[in-house]
Amino acid sequence: MEKAVDVPRSPFKILIACPSGLPPSQVSIAFSESYDRIPHPDSSLEDSISEIWNQRLQTNSFLFNGKKFRYGGFTFLSEGGSMNEDSHVRLHLGLTDYRTFVGTNLSPLWERFLVPSEDDSISCQHSSSPLGNGAIVETSDGKIVLLQRSNNVSEFPGHFVFPGGHPEPQELGIESHGDVKGFADSNTINRKLSQEMFDSIIREVVEEIGVPPESLSDPVFIGISRRELNVRPAAFFFINCSLDSVEIQKFYTSAQDGYESTQLYTVPMLKI
């Protein structure tokens, strides 16, 4: 008889996996109020959002309450129901803000906002769940870029992360759902939202590690993961960089958003 062993719980759940990578033409957006957060019926829990935000402001002057895209699920479209070169992913996005993120996902009470359900969109319907992004950046000498977060950031200070941040509604002039009326039609806004998913990750990489944008390849979408601790979703992209590890380290010293991290590392990529 084999001895039973405890299998450690993974810190992340893979919601979408596209290992071959999808270009912008195969990633679309459905943007709607129906994907916005639903307030929790417990009024005291709702009130805690403002209380926690105000507490954080007193200890961290860097905090800013900006609008964010809220992840509300996805639709996977492909011939035969399996991943292939013609696969297409449609992301469901609403609106939220950083204040609500701090007061729900980052709250000590974050688990109380969850609903028991196997359906991720239902389970997290009372959470802010802003869609973050991250980049797997491979250097010309075959290494992957990692950053160690500063102690000044509100989310996981001191931890090791991939370069990234958020796609930004403000880049498209969106502060509310009413702002989309300025676009020609729903296809136009959804196409622009899809492009922002890809444009934003290039911006984040350039700002966080300091490399010139022309050194980066066009990103491809490789999936979405959700952190099990605080159910935070993030879209991930793969990008090749034409610079080697030493060159990237030199650019990092003058990165625009270098204050968000304390050190850049390049680590060998395991080939499976």
Image (tube, helix red, strand yellow):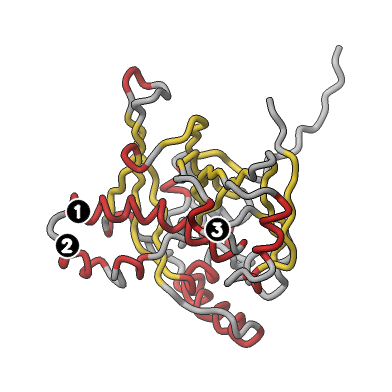
Relative image position of residue 209 (x, y in whole percent)? 62, 61
Name the residue tied to disc 3: 205
Relative image position of residue 147 (x, y in whole percent)? 69, 58
Name the residue tied to disc 1: 188
- Please give the name of the residue rendered at 70% of the width and 70% of the height, measured from the top-left corner: 150
Q: CA distance from mark 3 to mark 1?
A: 26 Å
N-terminal label among 3 and 1: 1
Residue 152 seen in this snapshot:
yes
Q: Which mark is residue 183?
A: 2
Q: Indicate left or right for 119 with 171 as reference.
A: right
N-terminal label among 2 and 1: 2
Considering depth in this image, is 139 or 145 the residue closer to the camera? 139
Q: Quadrant of residue 176?
A: bottom left
Q: Secondary structure at mark 1?
A: helix
Marks 2/1 in contact by CB < 8 Å: the verdict is yes
Q: Quadrant of the C terminus?
A: top right
